Amino acid sequence: MNIAIIFAGGSGVRMGAGVPKQFLEINGKPILIHTLQLFQEHEEIDKIYLAMSRDYIRYTEQLVLDYRIDKMAAIVPGGETAQDSIFHALSKAAEENPGDSIVLIHDGVRPVVEYGVISDNIESVQQYGSAITSSLCYETVLVSKDGQTVDELPLRKESYTAQAPQSFYLKDILEAHEAVRATERRYENMVDACTIYRALGHKPHMVIGNRGNIKVTTPEDVYMFRALLQYKENEQAFGFGLTDRLAAKMNRYKKQEKVRHGEQDMGKK
């Protein structure tokens, strides 16, 4: 099984919108739905588990019905931190799926990851046991402990930013979470799945992601997301190449139609 683990428990404080940022509507759809549809329409993804603030589960269930996210296996209550929320979703997935299932852990407000990056994550886990979606830094990275003076200046050619999805075998990342949760400090300074996985001595494998794979956190990100959506629409309209996402969606319904006609023919016989 290839399973998407989506966490969307943000409060929207940095956005300043008054509602959780995952529910802000861009081009007529909530950001969360834009994200879920990436995995819904990817033919290699079998199931989706979503961790959500308890206060918004009923609302999210309705959105899932409205937008026909039929790969949704469960929506589970989130926790105190993002990592707690992810652990809840992983635990639910472990109850219902084999330990050698591949899980792709992804932000609910990261709605522009490309189709091919999802496929690359799955292939990387199959080959190396892990996949950390990354992007090469195009600006100089500074390390500062006090926020005023530069302590380190890593080489730009060796500097990357970690994105999402971050992918693993289900049993491996769940084991890493359980080990971290058993310590006194728990998730302190554990900013993502890559950090947790490395805490057990593993060496995560990197997968290069797409440059537009932004996390929509601030008002400026909203404008960038809208521009990226327009770019995708223009790409299709002007024949620059039909996106894999749209092609996969069309093929999925073609397969369903063939199955339906096959069942009808069997019924006639």
Image: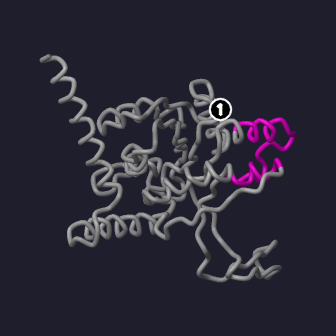
Q: Nearer the viewer, residue 147 or 77?
A: 77
Q: Residue at x 66, y 83 (%)?
A: 140
What residue type is disc 1 on? Gly
Task: Give the total of numbered labels.
Answer: 1
Colour setup of the view: one colour
Image position of 206 (left or right of 228): right
Q: Nearer the viewer, residue 244 or 61?
A: 244
Q: Is residue 167 above or below residue 181?
A: below
Identified at 30% across, 55% down, the residue is: 246
Question: As displayed, is residue 84 above or below residue 189?
Answer: above
Residue at x 21%, y 29% (from the top left corner)? 260
Q: Residue furthest front?
A: 269
Q: Position of residue 138 (x, y in %)?
A: 59, 81
Direction from residue 265 to residue 233 in the image, left or right: right
Q: Nearer the viewer, residue 152 or 123?
A: 123
Q: Quadrant of the C terminus?
A: top left
Q: Which residues are magenta?
A: 174-200
| Vertical order, 213 against 267 (above or below) | below
| Horizontal and vertical percent position of residue 81 | 66, 43
Q: Residue 98: give x, y in percent of width and height.
A: 61, 29
Q: Which residue position holds label 1? A: 99
Above or below, 8 against 98 in this view is below
Q: Is residue 190 a member of the stretch shown in magenta?
A: yes
Residue 15: say if magenta: no
Q: Taking 262 as reference, is 203 left or right?
A: right
Q: Secondary structure at mark 1?
A: loop
User: Farthest residue toward the right?
Assistant: 184
Q: Residues within 10 Å of mark 1 (few under 14, many from 20)?
A: some
Q: Position of residue 158 (x, y in %)?
A: 71, 77
Q: Quadrant of residue 51?
A: top right
